[in-house]
Image: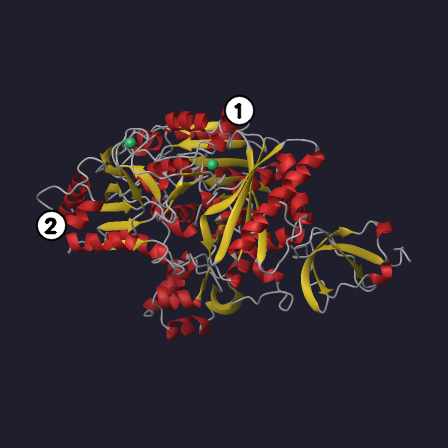
Amino acid sequence: MERVSGERRTIEVALPLPLFQTFTYGVPPEMPTPVAGTRVVVPVRNRKAVGICVGSTAAETVPVDRVRDIAVVPDEDPAVGSALLGLAKWMADYYVVPLGIVLRAILPAALGDATAPRPRLRTERIAVLARDLPSLQERDRLFARSRRQRELFEALEQLGGRSEVAHLVSRLGFSAPVIRALVSRGLITIQAAAVPRDPFAGRSPAPPPAHEPTGRQRESIDALVRAPPGDVFLLHGVTGSGKTLVYIELLREIVHRRGQTAIVLVPEIALTPQTVDRFRAVFGDQVAVLHSALSDGERYDAWRALRRGEKRIAVGARSAVFAPLEGLGAIIVDEEHETSYKNGETPRYHAREVAIVRARAEGAIVVLGSATPSLESWQNAESGKYRRLSLPDRVGGARMPAVEVVDLREGRSPSAQHAGTSLEPFRKVFSESLEAALGERLQRGEQSILLLNRRGYASFLQCDSCGDVRTCPNCSVSFTYHRTPERLVCHYCLREETAGDTCRRCGGATVRQHGTGTQQVERLLAERYPYARLARMDVDTTTGKWAHANILDRVGRGEVDILLGTQMIAKGLDFPNVTLVGVVDADVGINLPDFRASERCFQLLSQVAGRAGRGAKGGDVVIQTRVPGHHAVVCALSHDYRAFVDAEVAARRHPSYPPFTRLAHLVASGDREDATAALAERLSEWLTAALAAWGRDEVTVVGPAPCPIERIKRRWRWHLLLKSERPASLTRLGRALMERFPVPDAHALRVTFDRDPVSLL
Ligand SMILES: [Zn+2]
Ligand SMILES: [Zn+2]
């Protein structure tokens, strides 16, 4: 067989196919050899696909007669720079995903379409000043009686000499004849130009923060500015302590003084429009906002502007970590504990981890900011891997809100005065304390936020007297209550126990608990307070692209008295007139069958409490619970993150969970229940055999068991948990499994490998 020789050039191409390999293609004689990172359109069977050239083929490996040629090289420059290509290779290895699938995920979708190699840019008419009029006398003479023409001319001057015609007409109210008049006088020209589609363009930016950095903020800023490349900082600041100001001052140094670029990751743009507005207020046109709801064309525009260096700061949700910036100086991960940084589909990367790997490779620093850092990041700061900066006080002398815990076990039975009245259903959900607090706010014209913890789908059994919830002794997670037959099941290890009517701890009666829906609570509120203006924010009310921002803008304008919502309302909102935050039922979150349930609950309670009292009026928080002694509740009550971490870290040692071990979550899913269970069994046997063949016990296999959420989108789900203290062992086992484990019916059954999972539901 003929081998590659000097006459035939071949390259290796990564394609978005579920195969752990690259593919060899020939370069036609008339074509220059593409450099690594360049997009190439290649034949795959009888269609065309877009791949990324990852380098030349090692000369002696390819039978040349079976190699097909690349069809087209659509771009002049590589779509993926060498640093990002290196990052993609790391991700492919660590998350056990084919390189081509990683590369497709990190590029804008528009670049993956073989039929339209380059998305068309939207063009728009731009008015551009054609000459200067430095002297006032000249202006007076030229515009003598044409007041609007002069206003248009001066508006354009203020806009930096150019503006979209549409903006001048619809926003500033200039008429077409006025614009035409300036054109005919030679004062402006109209040009067609490619215009980025910026959905934030219509939002008026917030005014820059008025206050100077406090002493503590200044210390943090100085430490960041002096940091050597590659350093990772954990910026631990209480809610309202002014972390955003620290970010902005750091970016002034990085972008304005050093001429470098930066990435700012936020949990979800739609939920944090205020934060984004503040960056735009300071850095204006330098900022590209990347949003998960952008159209492909909008995303491509932003990507292109970053790639060309026209924009120097990328602000966005997790995928903004792949912004094609050169000369990266800093990556900021705001609210680093948020689970939305984890991608929910392949590649299942965690943007915080990717940010650290990228920053170290490119010589940038990383700032992880949070009021309630993840246990992993906290542990890394304790061990000295990260450097810790603290902002222990709220800025502007604001105090932390007073938190009151209402014990739902007391006075659970409706008090005599309401029994049988129309108030009875309301009183089952709202304690007298919370009702009184709400009433006061309505009277004073102040605003309230009510949080309903994650919608309950798993029932649990709780003691009505002591609040105890039974947990699996093997796994330390709550048992899930099953009705038929009645039993308690651990959804990690499949241990079963009888349910029983009495509490094992105190002998009290047990009751089945389940979450209350947001709609139901909204109806109760509407009946109780017919004149209150209510807004509800949950997955049902926020399907539109800007639905979140619109609801929040209404709150900001004072058009809402009570905002009711799921955990999405707990994030970075800052409304000075919100003086009450109520948590309707804290227990639903605490008792989810997930080892992170307490951590999530503490974070949520702390974050939502942080929404109260950010203005001069102060604020109160009311938390309703049946477990007032639970460390997540106690520590949220006292705003004591350290105490929470101490208790939680101790609980993670035995049985061991992160940060003391590394996890991978294997989920088998299928359209038939029996076949899915059988697949999970076979996975377990395969893993056990593979580990035995290695002769090492570096990885522990837990399960299989049905997932706590047993069905999603009509697919049954079973899972296994892999634990190891050695990351490399998980990589090796995961790679062997994903490459070699035979899935019997690949159309109906699927196996996913989730490294460092954030949820085991
Ligand atoms: Zn009890
Ligand atoms: Zn268990």
Residue 105 drawn above or below residue 68: above
On the image, the x and y values in percent for residue 732 come to: 67, 39
Seen at 49% across and 68% down, the residue is 124
Q: Mark 2 — residue?
A: 420
Drawn side of residue 671 relative to residue 473, left or right: right
- Earlier sequence position, callout 1 versus callout 2: 1
Residue at mark 1 to residue at mark 2: CA–CA distance? 59 Å
Residue type at mark 1: give it.
Ser
Would you say the beta carbon of the disc 1 residue lies within 8 angstroms of ligand 2? Answer: no
Circle 1: is it few (<14), some (14-19), or many (20+) Cα within 10 Å?
few
Question: Which residue is under mark 1?
Answer: 383
Left or right: residue 741 compared with residue 553: right
**Could you tell me residue 491's position as x and y percent?**
46, 42
Residue 396 in the image, given as x and y percentages of width and height? 30, 33
Q: Nearer the viewer, mark 1 or mark 2?
A: 2
At numbered mark 1, what does the secondary structure look like: helix, strand or loop?
loop
* Residue 286 rendering spot, x and y as whole percentages: 49, 50
Helix, strand or loop at label 2? It is: loop
Q: Is residue 487 left or right of residue 751?
A: left
Three-letter code for the amino acid on which mark 2 is drawn: Gly
Q: Quadrant of the N terminus?
A: bottom right
Task: Specify whether residue 509 is in view.
Answer: yes
- Tell whether 573 sits left or right of 596: left
Look at the image and tell me whether residue 94 can be seen.
Answer: no
